[in-house]
Image (cartoon, rainbow, N blue to C red):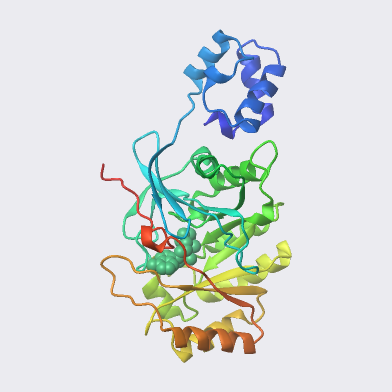
Amino acid sequence: MDIRDMSQDELIKIMEELNEPKFRAKQLYEWLHTHNVADYDKMTNLSKALRGKLNELYPLGNSEVAEIERSQDGTRKYLMELDDGMSVETVGMPIAFDENKKDVKRLTVCFSTQVGCPMECTFCATGQQGLVRDLSASEMVDQIIMVQDDFGERVGNVVAMGQGEPFLNYENLLLALRRMNTDPGLGIGARKITVSTCGLIDGIKRFAEEPEQFRLAVSLHSARQKVRDTLMPRCVNQPLDDLQEALIYYNLKSGRRVTLEYMLISGINDTVSDLDALVAFCDGIKCHINLIPLNRVEGSAYQPSSRSTTKAWISRLNAEMIPVSLRNSRGFDINGACGQLRSRVEK
Ligand code: SAH
Protein backbone atom coordinates (compact mmCIF):
# COMPACT_ATOMS: atom_id res chain seq x y z
CA MET A 1 0.00 0.00 0.00
CA ASP A 2 1.16 3.51 -0.81
CA ILE A 3 2.07 5.28 2.41
CA ARG A 4 0.13 8.34 1.24
CA ASP A 5 -3.06 6.34 1.36
CA MET A 6 -2.61 5.57 5.06
CA SER A 7 -4.34 7.33 7.93
CA GLN A 8 -2.44 9.04 10.76
CA ASP A 9 -3.24 6.04 12.97
CA GLU A 10 -1.65 3.71 10.47
CA LEU A 11 1.41 5.95 10.33
CA ILE A 12 1.63 5.85 14.13
CA LYS A 13 1.80 2.06 13.92
CA ILE A 14 4.61 2.29 11.40
CA MET A 15 6.54 4.64 13.67
CA GLU A 16 6.04 2.29 16.61
CA GLU A 17 7.41 -0.58 14.57
CA LEU A 18 10.43 1.55 13.68
CA ASN A 19 10.92 2.51 17.35
CA GLU A 20 10.24 6.14 16.62
CA PRO A 21 8.18 8.50 18.77
CA LYS A 22 4.52 8.95 17.88
CA PHE A 23 4.84 12.58 16.82
CA ARG A 24 6.94 11.51 13.84
CA ALA A 25 3.71 10.18 12.35
CA LYS A 26 2.19 13.64 12.48
CA GLN A 27 5.28 15.20 10.94
CA LEU A 28 5.28 12.64 8.15
CA TYR A 29 1.56 13.13 7.57
CA GLU A 30 2.07 16.86 7.22
CA TRP A 31 4.86 16.44 4.68
CA LEU A 32 2.76 14.04 2.68
CA HIS A 33 -0.55 15.85 2.83
CA THR A 34 -0.13 19.50 3.80
CA HIS A 35 2.99 20.04 1.75
CA ASN A 36 2.40 17.30 -0.81
CA VAL A 37 6.06 16.33 -0.71
CA ALA A 38 6.84 13.09 -2.54
CA ASP A 39 10.53 12.82 -1.62
CA TYR A 40 11.66 11.67 1.84
CA ASP A 41 14.90 13.60 1.55
CA LYS A 42 12.97 16.85 1.60
CA MET A 43 11.40 15.96 4.97
CA THR A 44 14.10 17.74 6.88
CA ASN A 45 12.73 17.30 10.39
CA LEU A 46 12.97 13.49 10.10
CA SER A 47 16.35 11.91 10.78
CA LYS A 48 18.41 10.71 7.87
CA ALA A 49 18.21 7.16 9.18
CA LEU A 50 14.42 7.26 9.36
CA ARG A 51 14.17 8.74 5.87
CA GLY A 52 16.34 5.92 4.58
CA LYS A 53 14.19 3.27 6.24
CA LEU A 54 10.97 4.78 4.98
CA ASN A 55 12.36 4.96 1.50
CA GLU A 56 13.23 1.30 1.62
CA LEU A 57 9.94 0.10 3.13
CA TYR A 58 7.51 2.55 1.54
CA PRO A 59 8.97 3.96 -1.64
CA LEU A 60 7.09 7.01 -2.90
CA GLY A 61 6.10 6.49 -6.49
CA ASN A 62 6.32 9.47 -8.72
CA SER A 63 4.10 10.06 -11.70
CA GLU A 64 5.76 12.35 -14.18
CA VAL A 65 4.42 14.65 -16.83
CA ALA A 66 5.65 13.21 -20.10
CA GLU A 67 3.86 15.63 -22.39
CA ILE A 68 1.66 18.71 -22.28
CA GLU A 69 -0.56 19.84 -25.13
CA ARG A 70 -2.17 23.27 -25.05
CA SER A 71 -5.48 24.07 -26.66
CA GLN A 72 -6.42 27.47 -28.04
CA ASP A 73 -9.21 27.65 -25.46
CA GLY A 74 -6.76 27.42 -22.55
CA THR A 75 -7.32 23.72 -21.89
CA ARG A 76 -4.19 21.65 -21.30
CA LYS A 77 -3.90 17.92 -21.78
CA TYR A 78 -1.24 16.01 -19.89
CA LEU A 79 0.23 12.63 -20.52
CA MET A 80 1.19 11.29 -17.12
CA GLU A 81 3.79 8.63 -17.02
CA LEU A 82 3.36 6.29 -14.08
CA ASP A 83 6.04 4.39 -12.19
CA ASP A 84 5.68 1.24 -14.27
CA GLY A 85 5.93 3.09 -17.58
CA MET A 86 2.17 3.02 -18.23
CA SER A 87 0.47 6.30 -18.88
CA VAL A 88 -2.85 8.06 -18.55
CA GLU A 89 -4.18 11.38 -19.72
CA THR A 90 -5.45 14.22 -17.53
CA VAL A 91 -7.11 17.42 -18.64
CA GLY A 92 -6.94 20.84 -16.98
CA MET A 93 -9.59 23.39 -17.92
CA PRO A 94 -9.31 26.99 -16.70
CA ILE A 95 -13.09 27.33 -16.82
CA ALA A 96 -15.39 25.29 -14.67
CA PHE A 97 -17.39 22.43 -16.00
CA ASP A 98 -20.21 23.68 -13.86
CA GLU A 99 -23.54 22.39 -15.04
CA ASN A 100 -25.59 25.37 -13.85
CA LYS A 101 -23.42 28.44 -14.04
CA LYS A 102 -21.75 29.32 -17.26
CA ASP A 103 -18.13 30.32 -17.60
CA VAL A 104 -17.09 30.23 -13.98
CA LYS A 105 -13.38 31.01 -13.82
CA ARG A 106 -12.30 28.07 -11.79
CA LEU A 107 -9.64 25.51 -12.61
CA THR A 108 -11.27 22.15 -13.32
CA VAL A 109 -9.39 18.88 -13.61
CA CYS A 110 -10.69 15.83 -15.42
CA PHE A 111 -8.74 12.86 -14.06
CA SER A 112 -8.39 9.21 -14.98
CA THR A 113 -9.13 6.28 -12.67
CA GLN A 114 -7.76 3.36 -14.71
CA VAL A 115 -5.15 2.75 -17.39
CA GLY A 116 -7.48 2.00 -20.28
CA CYS A 117 -11.04 0.85 -19.59
CA PRO A 118 -12.84 -2.49 -19.85
CA MET A 119 -16.27 -1.09 -20.77
CA GLU A 120 -15.85 -1.11 -24.56
CA CYS A 121 -18.32 1.72 -25.22
CA THR A 122 -18.40 1.91 -28.99
CA PHE A 123 -18.13 5.71 -29.19
CA CYS A 124 -15.17 6.10 -26.85
CA ALA A 125 -11.46 6.06 -27.71
CA THR A 126 -10.46 4.72 -24.29
CA GLY A 127 -13.08 1.97 -24.47
CA GLN A 128 -11.47 0.61 -27.60
CA GLN A 129 -8.23 -0.05 -25.78
CA GLY A 130 -9.32 -2.44 -23.06
CA LEU A 131 -8.23 -2.35 -19.44
CA VAL A 132 -4.59 -2.43 -18.46
CA ARG A 133 -4.83 -1.80 -14.72
CA ASP A 134 -6.42 0.22 -11.94
CA LEU A 135 -4.77 3.41 -10.72
CA SER A 136 -3.81 3.72 -7.07
CA ALA A 137 -5.34 6.54 -5.04
CA SER A 138 -2.04 8.39 -5.15
CA GLU A 139 -1.88 8.14 -8.90
CA MET A 140 -5.27 9.85 -9.02
CA VAL A 141 -4.37 12.56 -6.50
CA ASP A 142 -1.05 13.17 -8.27
CA GLN A 143 -2.94 14.12 -11.42
CA ILE A 144 -4.71 16.91 -9.55
CA ILE A 145 -1.53 18.18 -7.88
CA MET A 146 0.29 18.13 -11.17
CA VAL A 147 -2.32 20.29 -12.93
CA GLN A 148 -2.46 22.63 -9.92
CA ASP A 149 1.31 23.09 -10.10
CA ASP A 150 1.35 23.56 -13.84
CA PHE A 151 -1.36 26.24 -13.80
CA GLY A 152 0.02 27.74 -10.57
CA GLU A 153 -3.53 28.00 -9.36
CA ARG A 154 -5.75 26.13 -6.92
CA VAL A 155 -7.99 23.49 -8.36
CA GLY A 156 -11.65 24.34 -7.77
CA ASN A 157 -13.45 21.42 -9.39
CA VAL A 158 -12.55 17.85 -10.17
CA VAL A 159 -14.36 15.32 -12.29
CA ALA A 160 -13.60 11.61 -12.53
CA MET A 161 -14.37 11.65 -16.25
CA GLY A 162 -11.05 10.73 -17.75
CA GLN A 163 -10.00 7.23 -18.67
CA GLY A 164 -11.53 4.28 -16.90
CA GLU A 165 -14.70 3.35 -15.07
CA PRO A 166 -14.37 4.82 -11.57
CA PHE A 167 -16.74 2.37 -9.86
CA LEU A 168 -14.65 -0.60 -11.01
CA ASN A 169 -11.85 0.85 -8.88
CA TYR A 170 -14.09 1.88 -6.01
CA GLU A 171 -11.80 1.56 -2.97
CA ASN A 172 -8.93 3.49 -4.52
CA LEU A 173 -11.34 6.06 -5.93
CA LEU A 174 -12.84 6.80 -2.53
CA LEU A 175 -9.42 7.07 -0.89
CA ALA A 176 -8.43 9.52 -3.60
CA LEU A 177 -11.61 11.57 -3.35
CA ARG A 178 -11.13 11.86 0.40
CA ARG A 179 -7.58 13.09 -0.05
CA MET A 180 -8.80 15.64 -2.56
CA ASN A 181 -11.55 16.71 -0.22
CA THR A 182 -9.90 16.91 3.19
CA ASP A 183 -7.60 19.45 4.69
CA PRO A 184 -4.72 18.55 5.04
CA GLY A 185 -5.09 17.27 1.57
CA LEU A 186 -6.24 19.37 -1.33
CA GLY A 187 -9.23 20.88 0.46
CA ILE A 188 -11.57 20.76 -2.52
CA GLY A 189 -15.21 20.90 -1.44
CA ALA A 190 -17.07 17.58 -1.79
CA ARG A 191 -19.71 19.28 -3.90
CA LYS A 192 -16.99 20.30 -6.34
CA ILE A 193 -16.02 16.67 -6.84
CA THR A 194 -18.01 14.68 -9.40
CA VAL A 195 -17.77 11.02 -10.31
CA SER A 196 -19.04 9.91 -13.69
CA THR A 197 -20.02 6.27 -14.14
CA CYS A 198 -21.32 4.31 -17.09
CA GLY A 199 -24.13 3.29 -14.74
CA LEU A 200 -22.88 0.45 -12.54
CA ILE A 201 -25.78 -0.17 -10.21
CA ASP A 202 -23.93 -1.56 -7.19
CA GLY A 203 -21.47 1.32 -7.36
CA ILE A 204 -24.26 3.90 -7.49
CA LYS A 205 -25.95 2.43 -4.43
CA ARG A 206 -22.70 2.27 -2.52
CA PHE A 207 -21.80 5.83 -3.50
CA ALA A 208 -25.22 7.01 -2.28
CA GLU A 209 -24.27 5.83 1.18
CA GLU A 210 -20.96 7.67 1.48
CA PRO A 211 -21.14 10.45 4.05
CA GLU A 212 -19.56 13.12 1.84
CA GLN A 213 -21.58 15.25 -0.55
CA PHE A 214 -19.72 14.06 -3.65
CA ARG A 215 -21.69 14.47 -6.84
CA LEU A 216 -22.72 11.77 -9.26
CA ALA A 217 -23.03 11.82 -13.02
CA VAL A 218 -24.24 8.87 -15.08
CA SER A 219 -23.47 8.32 -18.74
CA LEU A 220 -26.91 7.38 -19.99
CA HIS A 221 -26.66 8.03 -23.74
CA SER A 222 -29.87 6.16 -24.37
CA ALA A 223 -33.02 5.36 -22.43
CA ARG A 224 -33.91 2.59 -24.90
CA GLN A 225 -32.50 -0.72 -23.81
CA LYS A 226 -31.61 -1.99 -27.31
CA VAL A 227 -29.90 1.22 -28.31
CA ARG A 228 -28.00 1.46 -25.05
CA ASP A 229 -26.90 -2.17 -25.38
CA THR A 230 -25.37 -1.40 -28.77
CA LEU A 231 -23.61 1.74 -27.59
CA MET A 232 -22.47 0.35 -24.25
CA PRO A 233 -22.18 -3.41 -24.73
CA ARG A 234 -20.64 -4.11 -21.34
CA CYS A 235 -23.61 -2.47 -19.61
CA VAL A 236 -26.13 -5.05 -20.81
CA ASN A 237 -26.24 -6.54 -17.34
CA GLN A 238 -27.10 -3.14 -15.87
CA PRO A 239 -30.66 -2.82 -17.23
CA LEU A 240 -32.33 0.58 -17.47
CA ASP A 241 -35.16 -0.34 -15.06
CA ASP A 242 -32.65 -1.23 -12.38
CA LEU A 243 -30.58 1.83 -13.18
CA GLN A 244 -33.64 4.04 -12.77
CA GLU A 245 -34.40 2.44 -9.44
CA ALA A 246 -30.79 2.89 -8.29
CA LEU A 247 -30.91 6.58 -9.22
CA ILE A 248 -34.11 7.11 -7.27
CA TYR A 249 -32.42 5.37 -4.35
CA TYR A 250 -29.44 7.69 -4.79
CA ASN A 251 -31.76 10.74 -4.73
CA LEU A 252 -33.47 9.60 -1.55
CA LYS A 253 -30.40 8.40 0.28
CA SER A 254 -28.11 11.32 -0.54
CA GLY A 255 -30.68 14.07 -0.95
CA ARG A 256 -28.84 15.07 -4.11
CA ARG A 257 -29.72 15.40 -7.74
CA VAL A 258 -27.92 13.26 -10.30
CA THR A 259 -26.56 14.47 -13.63
CA LEU A 260 -27.47 12.33 -16.62
CA GLU A 261 -24.99 12.67 -19.46
CA TYR A 262 -26.47 12.19 -22.89
CA MET A 263 -24.33 12.39 -25.96
CA LEU A 264 -26.28 13.04 -29.14
CA ILE A 265 -25.29 10.82 -32.06
CA SER A 266 -26.98 11.47 -35.36
CA GLY A 267 -29.53 8.81 -36.30
CA ILE A 268 -28.50 6.54 -33.42
CA ASN A 269 -29.94 7.97 -30.22
CA ASP A 270 -31.45 11.32 -31.28
CA THR A 271 -34.87 10.45 -32.75
CA VAL A 272 -38.21 11.48 -31.29
CA SER A 273 -38.67 7.99 -29.81
CA ASP A 274 -35.30 8.35 -28.11
CA LEU A 275 -36.40 11.65 -26.65
CA ASP A 276 -39.73 10.18 -25.48
CA ALA A 277 -37.84 7.33 -23.82
CA LEU A 278 -35.53 9.79 -22.08
CA VAL A 279 -38.44 11.85 -20.76
CA ALA A 280 -40.08 8.66 -19.45
CA PHE A 281 -36.82 7.50 -17.86
CA CYS A 282 -36.45 10.79 -15.99
CA ASP A 283 -39.90 10.53 -14.48
CA GLY A 284 -39.43 10.21 -10.74
CA ILE A 285 -35.68 10.91 -10.80
CA LYS A 286 -34.32 14.20 -9.48
CA CYS A 287 -31.93 14.85 -12.30
CA HIS A 288 -30.26 17.28 -14.58
CA ILE A 289 -29.59 16.37 -18.19
CA ASN A 290 -26.24 17.31 -19.62
CA LEU A 291 -26.32 17.03 -23.38
CA ILE A 292 -22.86 16.38 -24.77
CA PRO A 293 -21.97 16.99 -28.38
CA LEU A 294 -20.33 13.85 -29.75
CA ASN A 295 -16.61 14.29 -30.23
CA ARG A 296 -15.20 12.56 -33.26
CA VAL A 297 -13.01 9.58 -32.52
CA GLU A 298 -10.64 8.31 -35.17
CA GLY A 299 -12.01 5.30 -37.01
CA SER A 300 -15.57 5.80 -35.78
CA ALA A 301 -18.50 6.31 -38.12
CA TYR A 302 -20.64 8.11 -35.54
CA GLN A 303 -21.59 11.69 -36.38
CA PRO A 304 -22.74 14.38 -33.98
CA SER A 305 -26.41 15.37 -34.17
CA SER A 306 -27.33 18.56 -35.99
CA ARG A 307 -27.73 21.86 -34.26
CA SER A 308 -31.46 21.88 -34.94
CA THR A 309 -31.93 18.45 -33.35
CA THR A 310 -29.96 19.55 -30.31
CA LYS A 311 -32.11 22.69 -30.05
CA ALA A 312 -35.30 20.63 -30.37
CA TRP A 313 -34.15 18.36 -27.54
CA ILE A 314 -33.43 21.31 -25.30
CA SER A 315 -36.86 22.87 -25.95
CA ARG A 316 -38.70 19.62 -25.31
CA LEU A 317 -36.79 18.97 -22.07
CA ASN A 318 -37.48 22.55 -21.01
CA ALA A 319 -41.16 22.04 -21.75
CA GLU A 320 -41.11 18.86 -19.66
CA MET A 321 -39.51 20.89 -16.83
CA ILE A 322 -36.43 18.68 -16.85
CA PRO A 323 -33.35 20.81 -16.18
CA VAL A 324 -30.97 20.62 -19.12
CA SER A 325 -27.67 22.11 -20.20
CA LEU A 326 -25.46 21.71 -23.22
CA ARG A 327 -21.86 20.87 -22.47
CA ASN A 328 -19.38 23.23 -23.93
CA SER A 329 -16.74 20.95 -25.35
CA ARG A 330 -13.19 21.97 -24.50
CA GLY A 331 -9.79 20.98 -25.73
CA PHE A 332 -11.15 19.58 -28.98
CA ASP A 333 -8.12 20.70 -30.99
CA ILE A 334 -5.78 18.65 -28.78
CA ASN A 335 -7.97 15.53 -28.64
CA GLY A 336 -8.59 16.34 -25.03
CA ALA A 337 -12.37 16.36 -25.17
CA CYS A 338 -14.68 13.69 -23.72
CA GLY A 339 -14.09 10.25 -25.11
CA GLN A 340 -10.86 11.18 -26.84
CA LEU A 341 -8.36 10.17 -24.18
CA ARG A 342 -6.02 7.33 -24.97
CA SER A 343 -3.35 5.63 -22.94
CA ARG A 344 -0.01 5.17 -24.54
CA VAL A 345 0.56 1.68 -23.29
CA GLU A 346 2.40 0.41 -26.32
CA LYS A 347 5.65 2.13 -25.30
N1 SAH B 1 -16.46 5.60 -17.40
C1 SAH B 1 -17.06 6.81 -16.94
C2 SAH B 1 -16.17 8.04 -17.04
C3 SAH B 1 -15.37 8.25 -18.30
S1 SAH B 1 -16.12 8.85 -19.76
C4 SAH B 1 -18.36 7.04 -17.64
O1 SAH B 1 -18.71 6.25 -18.50
O2 SAH B 1 -19.06 7.98 -17.30
C5 SAH B 1 -16.56 10.51 -19.50
C6 SAH B 1 -17.73 10.93 -20.37
O3 SAH B 1 -17.36 11.08 -21.76
C7 SAH B 1 -18.84 9.90 -20.36
O4 SAH B 1 -20.08 10.53 -20.26
C8 SAH B 1 -18.66 9.26 -21.73
O5 SAH B 1 -19.79 8.57 -22.11
C9 SAH B 1 -18.33 10.47 -22.57
N2 SAH B 1 -17.80 10.14 -23.88
C10 SAH B 1 -17.12 9.04 -24.27
N3 SAH B 1 -16.83 9.09 -25.57
C11 SAH B 1 -17.32 10.26 -26.04
C12 SAH B 1 -17.30 10.90 -27.31
N4 SAH B 1 -16.73 10.34 -28.37
N5 SAH B 1 -17.89 12.10 -27.40
C13 SAH B 1 -18.46 12.70 -26.32
N6 SAH B 1 -18.50 12.14 -25.11
C14 SAH B 1 -17.94 10.93 -24.95
**Which residue is drawn at the image coordinates 48% and 40% (left, top)?**
139
Q: Position of residue 26 (x, y in %)?
A: 70, 23
Measuring from the top left, give residue 332's x and y in whole percent: 40, 63
Q: Quadrant of the C terminus?
A: top left
Horizontal side of residue 23 vs 74, given as left or right: right
Count of numbered marks? 0
Horizontal and vertical percent for residue 335?
37, 59
Farthest-out residue, front: 72
Q: In the rendered view, would you say 17 is above or below 119?
A: above
Q: Quadrant of ligand 1?
A: bottom left
The image shows residue 318 at horizontal and vertical percentages of: 62, 85
| Image: 220 above or below 120 | below
Residue drawn at x 70%, y 56% is 213
Q: Quadrant of residue 11?
A: top right
As drawn, 52 above or below 298: above
- Is residue 249 found left or right of 124 in the rendered image? right
> Residue drawn 34% across and 61% down?
125
| Quadrant of res 19 | top right
Asked whether residue 235 appears in the rendered view, the answer is: no
Asked whether the viewer can see residue 197, the reply is yes
Q: Nearer the viewer, residue 279 or 299?
A: 299
